[in-house]
Amino acid sequence: MGLLMTFILQGLSEYPKVEKLLFVMCLMMYLVILLGNSPLIILTLLDSHLHTPMYFFLGNLSFLDICYTSSFIPSMLIHFLSQKKTISFLRCVVQMSVSYTMGSTECVLLAVMAYDRYVAICNPLRYPIIMSKALCIQMAALSWGLGFLNSLTETILAIQLPFCGKNVINHFVCEILAFVKLACTDISLNEIAIMLGNVIFLFSPLLLICISYIFILSTVLRINSAEGRKKAFSTCSAHLTVVTVFYGTILFMYMKPKSKDSAVDKLIALFYGVVTPMLNPIIYSLRNTEVLGAMRKLMRRHWFWRKG
């Protein structure tokens, strides 16, 4: 059947009133994602004070969050209000591939950002030399490249499966595990590949993040003045908060007992997919005086330009 096949995204079809409420909530959160991440990207490009490795990676994270949520939220919003919740085989594969690429890339990018904070705090005198522009571009490219390769591998394995008629995906979106479960053959290889990919891209970066923060904590505790310790911690507090939210949600999803009601599991997955990208720009804006200062400066320029 292959390319001619059409899938039905079940979502919460049995709870139409809940879907209407989810439409309003997800629309509002998507607007926050766009309006929160877009200014961060613009600021990191336009403001010379933000032309540093930390903000270069933050710009990548913001762009990634926009791409990730845009791969599934617009179509999901349409399905919330539609009786016909169908998606073509090709669109399903593209949606699945893009979202998987972005998820994998974010894991690696968060580890890269932790390394940046490690160098900034533990080796401040050599920071401009170590974190050169060339190295930052290479590390960002590596994050995107690894995420793409992981997604490509999983997607190729998934689309080679035979589908014999079952076409109802028990999810809001084309999620890879829900997709392969529709195949009418043994999917052990796909499940092993997905599990290995999750271990490599979730827990390897998390291990590197933990190691980085152990060294950061050790260095900060050796600083004599309380003001110095507070300043050092403040430079990585936003990143640490984002990592806690990101991995906290994922670990909760993996470690909680499977619910008898699949609706609960789908809502938790939706929370991870929408709420986490929405919180990232809020955390980096509220906890970062440089970003707030750059925003005020850009608003003043815009105000003077309009008056002029």
Image (cartoon, grey):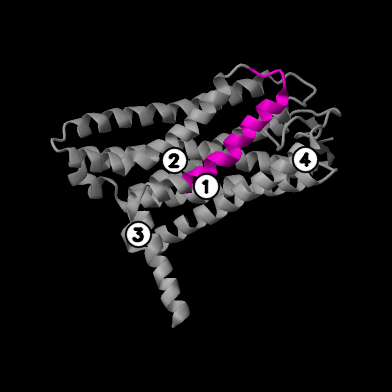
Q: Residue furthest bottom?
A: 308
The answer to whether marks 4 and 1 mark residues whose Cβ atoms lie closer than 8 Å is no
Residue that label 1 marks:
64
In which image quadrant can residue 215 be found? top left
**Image location of residue 185, percent across then percent down:** 77, 20
Residue that label 2 marks:
109
Residue that label 4 marks:
89
In which image quadrant can residue 218 be found? top left
106 relative to 82 in the view: left or right: left
Which three-letter amino acid code belongs to the residue tagged 3?
Gly
Which three-letter amino acid code belongs to the residue tagged 1?
Leu
Q: Which of marks 3 and 1 is in front?
A: 3
Distance from the alpha carbon under mark 4 to that under mark 1: 24 Å
The answer to whether marks 2 and 1 mark residues whose Cβ atoms lie closer than 8 Å is yes
Which residues are drawn in magenta?
258-281
Looking at the image, tell me whether mark 3 or mark 2 is earlier in sequence order: 2
Q: What element carries label 3?
A: helix
Distance from the alpha carbon under mark 3 to that under mark 4: 47 Å
The answer to whether marks 2 and 4 mark residues whose Cβ atoms lie closer than 8 Å is no
> Callout 2: 10 Å neighbours few (<14), some, many (20+)?
many
Distance from the alpha carbon under mark 2 to that under mark 4: 30 Å
Residue that label 3 marks:
293
Q: Does the magenta stretch include residue 154?
A: no
Q: Which of marks 4 and 1 is in front?
A: 1
The answer to whether marks 3 and 4 mark residues whose Cβ atoms lie closer than 8 Å is no
Q: Is mark 2 on a helix, strand or loop?
A: helix
**Image location of residue 306, percent across then percent down:** 47, 78
Looking at the image, tell me whether mark 2 or mark 1 is earlier in sequence order: 1
